[in-house]
Amino acid sequence: MGLWRYALEQPVTAICPLLSALDFANEWVTINGGWMRVSEGYAWDGCSPSIRVPGTRIWLGTPDGPLGADGRPVSWRASLLHDALCQFRHEIPGLKQAIATGVFAQELVRADAPWLMTSLYPAAVLWLGPRDFPGDLEALT
């Protein structure tokens, strides 16, 4: 797996009403009509910050949470969508930090993440995550 904790073996599609005003497509991400699709092969590190201990399968940093109903950590889908939004934030016209954080928060709730995660993780992402989103910068000009 290399530098990444997760890699998609098949595309993931999510209903994201917060993205309904956005329209975007590239090789990895499609956003249209409140839907978001992340393509097969996309890789990410889960909740950040985290680092892999060289030569092992051990990751240190922010926990991805307990396993959910699908057998994956409850933050798996939330971190996937948020990481993809953040990675391509400079290419997605109108994307704001609050929208990306909101998608992350909604997906944690949908995954039935513990209360501590649904309250603390979005706040941490808002304050510690990237701040240079095009939608926010457009509002300043």
Image (spheres, grey):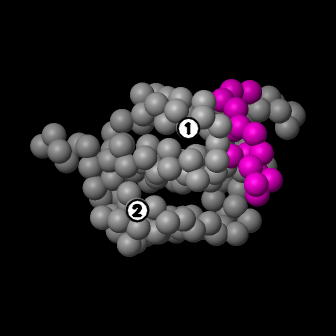
Residue 15 appears anywhere in the view: yes
Residue 73 lies in the magenta stretch: yes
Residue 6 locus on image (x, y percent): 72, 50
Q: Considering the whole magenta stretch, tell me its main secondary structure.
A: loop
Residue 34 lies in the magenta stretch: no
| Magenta residues, start to end | 60-74
Q: Which of the 4 quarters of the picture holds residue 32?
A: bottom left
Q: In the rendered structure, which amino acid carries the disc numbered 2? A: Pro
Q: Residue at x 45, y 61 (%)?
A: 16
Q: From mark 2 to mark 1, how far is it between C-alphas?
A: 18 Å
Q: Are marks 2 and 1 in contact (CB under 8 Å)?
A: no
| Image-based side of 132 in relation to 74, left or right | left
Would you place residue 36 above or below residue 76 in this image? below
- First reached walking from the N terminus: tag 2 or tag 1: 2
Mark 1, residue position: 118
Mark 2, residue position: 17
Q: Residue at x 76, y 57 (%)?
A: 70
In front: 47, or 74?
74
Residue 129 locus on image (x, y percent): 46, 34
Residue 97 locus on image (x, y percent): 36, 43
Callout 2 secondary element: helix
| Image-based side of 132 in relation to 8, left or right | left
Rendered-image quadrant of the C terminus: top left
Residue 82 appears anywhere in the view: no
